[in-house]
Image (cartoon, rainbow, N blue to C red):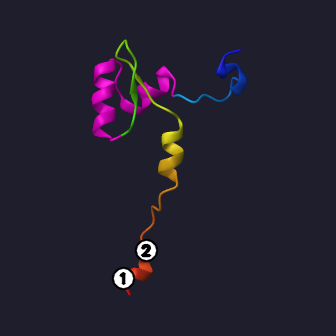
Amino acid sequence: MKPSDQLGSTYSRFLSKQELIDLTGKRAASAQRRALDFMKLPYIRRPDGTPVVTSGIFESRGNRKNSPNWESLS
């Protein structure tokens, strides 16, 4: 059994090809890597040159505190 079979069809550990295109706005693998580098998003490079991005990068970035600490200004 493949790991993806255990996770079910509604969850993927990696962004799909279309999600990667939507994220970067690029179709070519080299352009996607440049866009990911520019956005400082981590990825793994496959032997064929295509980037692999885990879906967890958005969860870890979402845990950051985005609102200002107004109390520190007083």
Task: Report the magenta residues as a range.
Answer: 15-40
Q: Relative to 21, is 38 above or below? A: below
Residue found at the far top of this picture: 48
Identify the residue position indicated by label 2 in the image. Answer: 69
Residue 22, image quadrant: top left
Tell me the residue at 72%/24% (across/down).
6
Which residue appears at 36% of the width and 82% of the height?
A: 73
Whole-percent x, y for residue 27 in the image:
36, 19
Which mark, by number, is residue 73? Answer: 1
Does the stretch in magenta take in 29? yes
User: Where's residue 71, x and y in %?
Assistant: 44, 82
For label 2, the crowd category at 10 Å Cα-Cα, with few meaning under 14, some 14 to 19 and many 20 or more, is few
Quadrant including the C terminus: bottom left
User: Which residue is depicted at the point 47% across and 57% down?
Assistant: 64
Identity, as a three-letter code, of the amino acid under mark 2: Asn
The answer to whether mark 2 and mark 1 are in CB contact below 8 A is yes
Query: In the rendering, which numbered label is found on residue 62?
Result: none
Q: Which residue is drawn at 41% across and 25% down?
A: 21
In the picture, measured across the screen, residue 30 lies left or right of residue 17, that is left
Disc 1 residue type?
A: Leu
Q: How far apart are marks 2 and 1 (CA)?
A: 8 Å
- Measured along the vertical axis of the image, is residue 72 above or below residue 63? below
Q: What element carries label 1?
A: helix
